[in-house]
Amino acid sequence: MYLVLIIKAIIIGIVEGITEFLPISSTGHMIIVGDLINFRDPTYRKAYVDMFEIVIQLGAILAILVLYWNKISGSLKNLAPGKWGFRLWCNVMIAFIPAAVIGVLFNNIIQEKLFNSITVACALVFGGFLMIFMENKYRMGNKINRIEDITAGQAFKIGCFQCLSLWPGMSRSASTIMGAWTGGLTNVAAAEFSFILAIPTMIAASGFSLLKVKITMTAPEIIALIIGFAVAFVVALVVVDKFISFLKKKPMRVFAIYRIFIGILVLILTYANIIHVTK
C-alpha cells in the first residue's frame, strides 16, 4: 500500500509541475487525475490528500523563485518609491487583492461545491472557449513587453480576472493571462506577470488552507509528501522555461483546444462511471 502511495505521489507531483503555470488548471488536473487513480478516495485520509495537494504547489512556486531569481532580487533592491521594483510589487499586491478577498469570503462554499471532476470539466470547456475568444479579440495588437511597464489600472484588471480561477478548472494562469491581454500585454509579459503574481497568491492560499489542516503524518506519508514536492519542483523548472519559449513564437490556442478536449472527455468518462467523483 505504501509503495502505491509513493507512486501516486509521483504522478500527482508530475501533474502539478506540468500544469501549475500552463493555462490548463493545475488544481483541476489534480482533482481529475486524483479521481482517476483513486488518490482522493477514502483509502487515504482526506486531510492528508488536501494537505499534500497544497504543499506540492509550493514546490512549483519554488521553481519560479529559482528561474526568476535575478529579476526578483533586482526588484527587491529597487523597492524605494519611484523605482521599478516598488512599482512592480505594488502592482502585484493590487492584482493579488480581489481574488484574496473573494477567496476568503467564499472558501468553504468553493471547497464544498466545486472540487469535483464534473465542475472542473465544465470549467475547462468554458475556459477554453473564453481563451479563444479573448485571444482573437485582444492579443494581436498588444505592445507591452515588460512587466515593469504595467500600470496600477492594468494590475487591478488582471486581479479581477484572477477571481475566475477560484472555480477549479478555470486556471489561475489562464485567468490572469486573459486579464493581461485586455490590458495590452503581450503573451510573454502576461505570462511573466502571472508567474510573479503566483508567488504571493499561492503562498497566501496555501498558508490559509494549511492553517485549517490538523494532521499527524506517518513516515510513509512524510516520504510521499517530500517526493511529491521535489517532483513538482523539478518538472515545473523544465515546463516554465519551455512555456516561455513557446509563447515567443506561437499563440495559446493549442492550450484552449486541449482544455475543451479534456473537459469533454472527462464528462464522458464521469458519466460512464470510469472516473468516480469524490464529494
Image: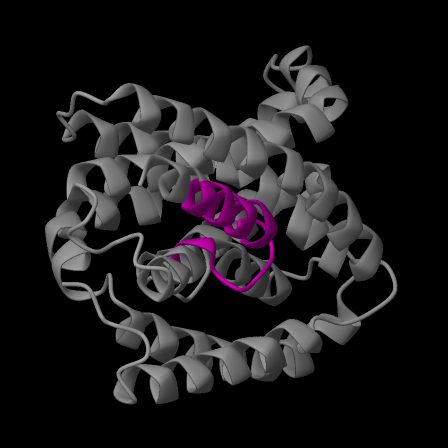
Query: From what the image shows, is residue 185 above or below residue 58?
Result: below
Picture residue at 54% right of the left edge, 84% below the top = 261
The quarter of the picture where the C terminus appears is bottom left
Relative to 252, is 88 on the left or the right? left
Picture residue at 69% right of the left edge, 76% below the top = 254
Query: From what the image shows, is residue 252 above or below residue 43?
Result: below
Query: From what the image shows, is residue 217 above or below residue 252?
Result: above
Picture residue at 76% right of the left edge, 21% below the top = 70
Range drawn in magenta = 7-27
Spot occupied by residue 150 in the image (x, y as percentages of width and height): 65, 45
Spot occupied by residue 224 in the image (x, y as percentages of width and height): 40, 31
Spot occupied by residue 146 in the image (x, y as percentages of width and height): 76, 44
Q: Is residue 68 visible?
A: no
Q: Quadrant of residue 66?
A: top right
Query: From what the image shows, is residue 249 above or below residue 88?
Result: below
Q: Is residue 10 magenta?
A: yes
Picture residue at 34% right of the left edge, 35% below the top = 2
Q: Main secondary structure of the magenta part?
A: helix
The quarter of the picture where the N terminus appears is top left
Foreground pick, 127 / 1: 1
Foreground pick, 267 / 250: 267
Q: Is residue 96 magenta?
A: no
Relative to 92, is 115 on the left or the right? left
Spot occupied by residue 230 in the image (x, y as percentages of width and height): 55, 29
